[in-house]
Amino acid sequence: MTTMREAFGEALIELARTRDDFVVLDADVAGGTGTAVFRDAFPDRFIQCAIAEQNMMSVAAGLSTTGVVPIVTCYAVFASMRAVEQARNSIAYPEFNVKVIASHLGLDVGPDGPTHQAIEDIAIYRAIPNFRVVAPADPFELKKALPVILDTEGPVYMRTGRSPIPYVFDRDVEFELGRGKVLREGMDMTIIAVGVMVHRALEAAEILEGEGVSARVVNMSTIKPIDRELIAESASRTGALVTAEDHNVIGGLGGAVSEVVTSTVPVPVECVGIRDRFAESGDPNDLAEKYGLTAEAICAAAKRVLERKAAVSAGG
């Protein structure tokens, strides 16, 4: 296992060796975001903005008008709340080509506690017009997503992560913005997951298989624009959905999937995530257990949604 932030720093260095069209902006947290290695390798392309995230967004907006691609890096709580006005008005409104890449999200943050556990950032950024929202499932997908994001014109918000995470993909994984990926086929119900919850969704599917339930697993690494076709097809094929995210259940992946389902193929949906509350400091795995972000929690949601599916069928 490795951390997403370490993979991010490595990916920046790899890309910088072959292209000179981007710079990295930091808010005095390079050690926390994984960009310290890039700073040391390419100091002339690293801009220290200090602890002034609002100003950093505005600096990035200005830089983008010169043809360079600014990559704004900081903790997700600051990117999505402290500097959200500048992200909205100075970057999204004029559709400037800025990439905001944030670490320290959800309960993955662990001991840094609720002040640094961003559980609202997906909801915030997907509500801002012109922003795309991406959350890779593992370090290999992150490394494939980064050049795609840099080559995509316009604002992008991407989540990385602080804690070690298991690999889901091989090195040759492909990333396509706006497309989900079926990782496991199943006929009884579908689990749609994002970020750290993808490997837990796959674990849940294994457990469910042992109990006679065939679960499809989808990695929805682009949350906006979301893959409406895949969601509708999964709803039609399996008749029930569970979403899983390290984020508040309000406004995140679950909300995005539910919006699609209600306007395409209405089926029962259960959302696994943080239940609209602040957590606490602790080991990320212990926090996941306490706040219901485990494979077992996904299995429990799957059983609930299957009961609802059966009730709908009986009523029909």
Image: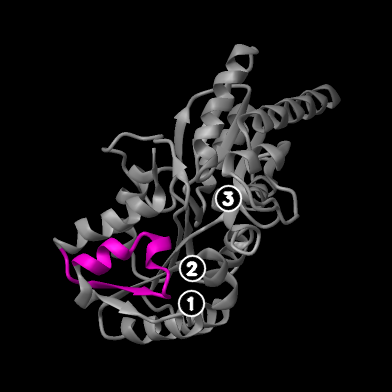
Dot 2 corresponds to which residue? 131
Q: How many marks?
A: 3
- Coordinates of residue 110 in the picture (x, y in percent): 58, 50
Dot placed on the residue nearer the N-terminal end, 3 or 2 = 3
Q: Quadrant of residue 121?
A: bottom right
- Taking the image as shown, residue 94 lies to the left or right of residue 107, namely left
- Coordinates of residue 197 in the picture (x, y in percent): 55, 40
Q: Residue at x 69, y 53 (%)?
A: 280
Instruction: Inspect the image, locate mark 1, and give the three-letter code of the amino acid beneath it.
Output: Ala
Q: Please state which of residues 133 and 10 is positioned toward the viewer in this rendering.
A: 10
- Taking the image as shown, residue 249 lies to the left or right of residue 147, namely right
- Taking the image as shown, residue 199 lies to the left or right of residue 240, namely left
In magenta, the rendered stretch is 19-41
Instruction: Inspect the image, locate mark 2, and give the three-letter code of the amino acid beneath it.
Output: Phe
Is residue 50 positioned above or below 102 on the image? below
Badge 1 crowding class, 10 Å Cα cut-off, few under 14, some 14 to 19, many 20 or more, is: many
Secondary structure under the numbered disc 1 in the rendered image: helix
Secondary structure under the numbered disc 2 in the rendered image: loop
Is residue 220 positioned above or below 298 on the image? below
Q: Which mark is residue 60?
A: none
Residue that protrudes farthest toward the right in the picture: 315
Dot 3 corresponds to which residue? 110
- Quadrant for the C terminus in the image: top right
- Quadrant for the N terminus in the image: top left
Dot placed on the residue nearer the N-terminal end, 3 or 1 = 1
